[in-house]
Image (cartoon, coloured by chain):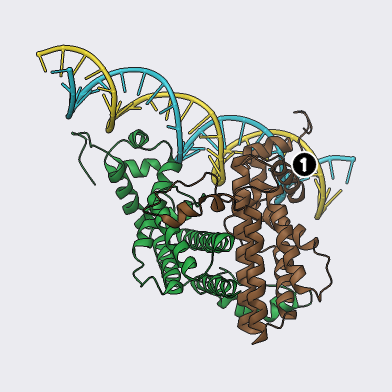
Chain colours: A green, B brown, C cyan, D yellow
Amino acid sequence: MANKASTRVRLDRASIIDAGMELAETGVAAISVRELGTHLGADPTAIYRHFASKDALMSALLDELNGQAAARVDLPAEDWAGRLRMLSEATLASFTRYPAIGAEATSLTTHGPGELAAIELMLDAFHRAGLRGQELVRHYALLASHVLAGAAGIARARADRRTDAEDSPWIDSPLLADPRQFPLIAENSTLLSELQDRELFLLGVDVIIEAARTAAAR
Amino acid sequence: MANKASTRVRLDRASIIDAGMELAETGVAAISVRELGTHLGADPTAIYRHFASKDALMSALLDELNGQAAARVDLPAEDWAGRLRMLSEATLASFTRYPAIGAEATSLTTHGPGELAAIELMLDAFHRAGLRGQELVRHYALLASHVLAGAAGIARARADRRTDAEDSPWIDSPLLADPRQFPLIAENSTLLSELQDRELFLLGVDVIIEAARTAAAR
DNA sequence: TCTATGCTGTCAACAGTGTTGTCACAGGCG
DNA sequence: CGCCTGTGACAACACTGTTGACAGCATAGA
């Protein structure tokens, strides 16, 4: 992959993050320190000279994703709803492109510049919608948690289901239920198995945007 | 805890699940097969005689939680919104009471009777709200994913933050941002750090219920 | 009642994970 | 030129889920 044993490779935070992104783009289910080390052509434990723990590294990678997603939003500031939708879709795209990062991202708060950019973008959008104070931060938090948790869940499904399909079912296997005990499940069984990941994710985004609109109208 | 070394303990699915619940109620961050084995007073690997994998065991435990939550809903069927709120709160309560189960629950679909009961309850509620067909299953799925992902996230935070507090902050540490680059973050910094886990979770539930109401009115 | 067979607990071990301490080398500074 | 800090290499630790071989128990059949 990189240098042979002869010379010692020189690492730094940026190159480690780059390697992590490359490795995640491969589609592996999870990033391990050892795998990342060999991918870098260096000893795995050398990574700990630049990151305090694997959690810290994963946070940095997740922040990178957040930053990429925020940077991809190019709609005019006036179209606040469009910007929110675009940010959400971009986040989902980043998470599914680098599933190992999105899947292992449990903390959902990175304290990095990428996250700050995404937060400011969302706050600005809801501010333009007319929200202020508690209403503002609450609707931001609602959208943020929905987007991060939703995208992480979809990434996790993609990670171990090993598929690059644009759309995948929300429930993996059809749920069989006794029509006498669970009539509505049985009745809507086919509709339920036709539900798609992404469609549901976007519906959630729209619902939150609509809630913000009516909250602002009051 | 149980028998001393002399006699072999007899295991079955029910007793293993019970032990898992007890162990999770302790507040441990995660359940390990070895720990669960010693808690049962048996060899850890004996568990594999009754569950194909740890994932299968965790699924069974999660299904138990779902069932408990669904069983705690006792409002009349007409009050569909109240029932949905109650189910959501009960799920959150179960997840935070057994954090190790809620935290390690990534798949969010257990295929067990507990899950089926919860699904039927939600479908029935949205049906009574007047939703049918695609609108019905979509709003169900929206609420289900929000409740499960949200409760899992809160449980995860509780698990490694080691606190039993009723309410905990949504973001653990205040986010410091340059007011020139991120004016809205800086301006709303205190409001952001005052956001609470549970409050946000319930707001999300209400937003989805409201969306269902307006969808049904059309 | 006695035997045979399959279920199930025990043990050792494997492959993998994150992480730490020790050592040695490289490069920049005085 | 020499020191000293930073950083990579190596070995090892503690932990994870999981499997295969073995042995004993309990039950079904004669």
Q: Toward which corner of the image does residue A100 lie, by quadrant?
A: bottom left
Residue A170: image location, x then y, percent? 55, 70
Q: Nearer the viewer, residue A75 or C7?
A: A75
Q: Nearer the viewer, residue B70 or B203?
A: B203
Q: Nearer the viewer, residue A101 or A70?
A: A70
Residue A108: image location, x then y, percent? 50, 52
Residue A119: image location, x then y, percent? 45, 58
Q: Toward which corner of the image does residue B67 lie, by quadrant?
A: bottom right
Residue A184: image location, x then y, percent? 72, 78
Horizontal arrangement in the rendering, residue C29 relative to residue B117 (left or right): left
Q: Toward which corner of the image does residue B3 lie, by quadrant?
A: top right
- The structure residue drawn at horizontal position 22% and vertical position 34%, both measured from the top left corner, is A8
The disc labelled 1 sits on which kind of residue? Arg
The crowd level at tag 1 (other Cα within 10 Å; few <14, some 14-19, many 20+) is few
Q: Which residue is mark 1?
A: B10
Horizontal arrangement in the rendering, residue B44 relative to residue C13 (left or right): right
Q: Looking at the image, is B148 positioned above or below residue A170?
A: above
- The structure residue drawn at horizontal position 39% and vertical position 47%, both measured from the top left corner, is A60
